[in-house]
Image: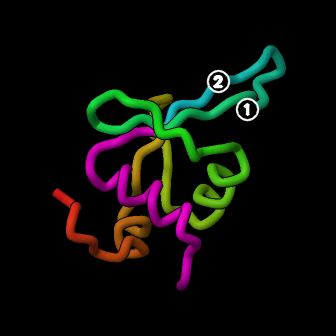
Amino acid sequence: MDISRAQQRILHLLAQGGRIEIERDDRRNIEAVACFTRDGWIYPGFDLTLFRKLKQLRAIRSQAGQPYRITDRGLTLVRSQLDNR
């Protein structure tokens, strides 16, 4: 399955140890999302539509209220790059 370049970048970041944190409003709807690298920096090119697409592909998931991480399916969607550690 082909995924977009933006989705590919986020999955690489998550494969290296990053996480996605969400903020909810009073009605428990997702208000904002932020993608953090493993070093704690915020990735600037991440928005709610990209988050929903990755969740729809089942490439990311949250367990027990923890931040969203990459799944095994997400790892299979990631193409190898030289900068992966």
Q: Residue furthest top?
A: 26
On the rendered structure, is 29 left or right of 11? Answer: right
Vertical placement of 7 versus 66: above or below? below
Q: Are marks 2 and 1 in contact (CB under 8 Å)?
A: yes
Work out whether residue 21 or residue 10 is closer to the camera in this orientation and state it. 10
Vertical placement of 1 versus 55: above or below? below
- On residue 21, the disc is none
Query: At x 55% / y 83%, what residue is drawn?
Result: 2
Vertical placement of 10 versus 42: above or below? below
Work out whether residue 2 or residue 81 is closer to the camera in this orientation and state it. 81
Query: At x 64% / y 24%, what residue is drawn?
Result: 23
Mark 2 and mark 1: span between their CA atoms? 6 Å
What residue did someone put label 1 on? Answer: 30
Q: Counting other residues with Cα less than 10 Å from the Cα at mark 1, is it few (<14), some (14-19), or many (20 or more)?
A: few
Q: Name the colouring of the figure.
A: rainbow
Vertical placement of 40 versus 20: above or below? above
Q: Is residue 42 magenta?
A: no
Query: At x 52% / y 31%, what residue is drawn?
Result: 21
Q: Earlier in the sequence, mark 2 or mark 1?
A: 2
What residue did someone put label 2 on? Answer: 23
Instruction: Tell me where the magenta segment starts and ends, as one range.
Output: 1-19
